Amino acid sequence: MKKNLAYWIACLTLSILLSGCAPAPAPDSLRAFDDPDSFSTRPCLVILNPTAARLKTLIELETRGLFKRGDLRVVGVYHEKESAQYQRSIQFARERKLDWIGFHRLTAALDPDTLFQDNGLTDEFRNIFEHSDGALFFGGADIPPALYGRDTHLLTAIHTPYRHFLELSFAFHLLGGNQNPNFTAFLDSDPDYAILGLCLGMQNLNVATGGTLVQDIWTQTYGRDTVEDVIALGPGAWHNNPFRRLHPLDDYFGITMHPIKLDPEGIFVKKWGFKPEDAPYILSSHHQAADTLGRGFKVAATSPDGRVIEAVEHTSYSRVLGFQFHPEASRLWDPALKSRFTPQDETETSLRAILEENPPSWDFHVKIWSWFRESLEQHKKSSGF
């Protein structure tokens, strides 16, 4: 009995000694912002909804010379409860040895009642904000209308609620909002932080700051009930291609191109150097749009008839912009990809040709990406990291 007791005491002692020498657990490779020191010298861009397609978009923009990455680090931030297959993104980055791309997985619970206040992710959001230079919000599915105080329209399609919970709460923490006037926005302490919202991304910025949405442009803004009535409005009011619905066998391109009207007092005229009469063409694919604007936002561009908001800018934070259109779409840049839009099109046309044939459309898109990249770089320099 004494020998057995001595044996177990020896085993326990040896176990304790060995445990003190054991290597520490490896850091979580999907928690990039847990290592703040790695962000001390390189500018960092946060992207939400970091699917493999989003990563390919950034690579395509760089390949085309539109988004000069340089030493930029990109971190995809996502919540583990989102429905997207982010494991594919992680695998894509690893297989291609894209060491400039990292990921940060969030796990704390979010629910509609706590999005626009301090919640379980507030400290994480602040850490991400303090160690990055800007955030990019991409397009996607409809936001649940209950999150902006509206009943759900019959044509609203809710597919990705947890993605909206995350992006709306993060955008609220960055910008503040009418829902909670006493909350101090992160950008109040760092107004040069850069934010770009694209399509759903712009809608997220608007809803996060207390704005609302038109849930279906054709029925609510224009009062049209049939596809034929929408076609009669003309391309400037389509916002996606109605011929795709009317003639599904004819392979018309599902999105559309139309010009936008720049606000004479907005950023594009006052700071980017475009003229009030300029009408750059853009790629449009949406059925919802900003309605009541959220706190701090003003209109920067509209559809040709002025009835749909196409771009917003922030009145307090000069590097915050939202576009209802898609300047990131790789199809814009490839002259080999051609499409037909209407039965009147005798030949297929590339989107790039439309940009080049309608100045200053091409220059406008180039400026979007040079502005955003410069904003990230300038923030890095001004932050003193």
Image: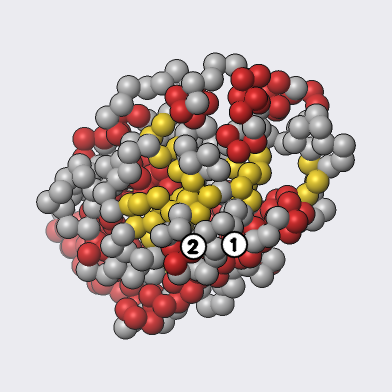
Instruction: Please give the residue where the numbered disc 2 appears in the rendered image.
Output: 268
Q: What residue type is labelled 2?
A: Phe
Residue holding disc 1: 364
**293, 166: nearer the viewer:** 293
Please state if 149 lies on the left or on the right of 164 as rendered.
Answer: left
Q: Earlier in the sequence, mark 2 or mark 1?
A: 2
- Image spot of residue 192 (x, y percent): 33, 70
Please identify the quadrant where the C terminus is shown. Answer: bottom left
Tag 2–tag 1 contact (CB < 8 Å): yes
User: Toward which corner of the image does residue 280 lie, by quadrant?
Assistant: bottom right
Q: Is residue 11 visible?
A: no
- Mark 1, secondary structure of its residue: helix
**Quadrant occupied by the N terminus:** bottom left
| Residue depicted at 53% across the width and 78% down the height | 71
Quadrant of residue 98 within the rendered picture: bottom right
Image point (12%, 51%), residue name: 182
| Residue lying farthest to the front in this orientation | 277
Rendered image quadrant of residue 136? bottom left
Q: Where is residue 177 in the image (x, y as percent from the top left)?
A: 23, 48
The residue type indicated by label 1 comes to Phe
